[in-house]
Image: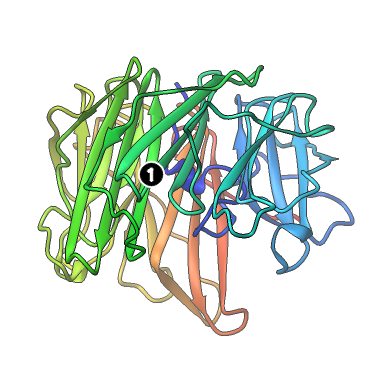
Amino acid sequence: MKLRGWPLWCALFAIPAVALGCAAILGRTEIETLPGLAVEPRSVTFVSDTEGWLSGSEGNCGTKCDQLFHTVDGGHSWQRVTLPAFDREWFGIADAGNWFALRRSADFYAHELELWSSHDGGGHWSRVRLPEDVRLPEFGVRAVITDGAVRVAAFDGRTGEIRMISSPVGVDDFTATPPFRAVDGRGRDSSISVDFGVVQGGSTSWFVGWISSTERGQSNWVGARMVDGRWSSFPLPCVSTNRPEVAAISATELAISCDPTGVVDARMGEYHLYVSTDAGDTFTDLGALAPRGVHARLIGAGTARDLVVAVPTGDPDAPTALRTSHDGGRTWTQTLNPRAPKGMSASGSPAQGEFFTPATGYARLSYVGEAPEGMDDLYLTRDGGNTWDRVTVD
């Protein structure tokens, strides 16, 4: 089962409001570098335990400096391939042939995104014709690729509705679900903001987000799911000012980490881990991940029993640890606690991650400090979170 974390927002390559960078090169053995390349690996996706794509940059200049590499032997060797020749807000790979991208409209005043596709591995791109009456706002669009389908969720602030379009990855045959009213529409009210994510497990899509309007003085936490083309609400186990970390494991299994107190100042909260086995109808509280006031989070789940979380340690020299459980969160083992780069400390959001298969996943640990102002270290596991390799590309 393939797991998508916040595909949106750490899925593959670039997405609105999230910096590039997510993962790693496969391999517990000695990691081979890309000779002659001054490339910093920032993002990766794998469609199996052996085939994947690595994105890196030769400089801090956005997507124009990106490089893309392909492996078919689990990351032991890489070949350079061609990225889309246009700026993009999101880029996703389904397999060697089928790639997708979201890009801004050429009409500056449209404030919309366009969906583009390539079915020859990036050689040729064409704009996808969307179903009638579907628009992709400039902000509030999320996409995931899993189980042979590409899905794009869009929140329309004018109507307060969520729409989902989807198609098999091999053809551009997108259909739209009926809209789901998440909140009252704002009409011309431009003060609304939205922060949400979409994850996919089997045939079930989950939407988790926070929608607010300062002019109306309203804020809403929204949990919605789509099964067989039909939307319904589901109760979130916790709410706070930080968007929950969500991992879809299967069509009925979901893991969420968040602050259950609902306190406005999230620093006062205590982050817990919750697991549902009935598609989100009910959740089991697995307990606090860290002491009160410490921002711990879910990294990923290979299965409902195999979970990985990131927890601040309080040690300035090694500020972030990964902990792995193979019994559904009853017991935990520390599996990674690296030293921070010299002159740096953990950022306010210390880690993100995702599992692509039950065995293979990544973790990105973020640091801030002296020049450079910030940096990420990428780690990969091939054994369900028991061991981790740091990724380096020279």
- Name the residue located 31 percent from the left edge and 25 percent from the top edge: 226
> Is residue 332 positioned above or below 4 on the image?
below
Question: At which x and y percent is residue 35?
Answer: 87, 52
- List the residue tagged with mark 1: 155
Q: Dividing the image into 4 quarters, which one contains the N terminus?
A: top left
Give the amino acid type for the residue marked by disc 1 in the picture. Phe
Question: At which x and y percent is residue 350?
Answer: 40, 63
Is residue 27 at least partly visible in the picture? no
Is residue 238 at least partly visible in the picture? yes
> Residue pushed farthest top?
228
Question: At which x and y percent is residue 238?
Answer: 15, 48
> Residue pushed farthest front?
188
Name the image quarter holding residue 162.
Answer: top left
Name the image quarter holding residue 31.
Answer: top right
Mark 1 neighbour class, 10 Å CA radius: few under 14, some 14 to 19, many 20 or more: many
> Is residue 95 positioned above or below 316 on the image?
above
Tell me the SS state at disc 1: strand
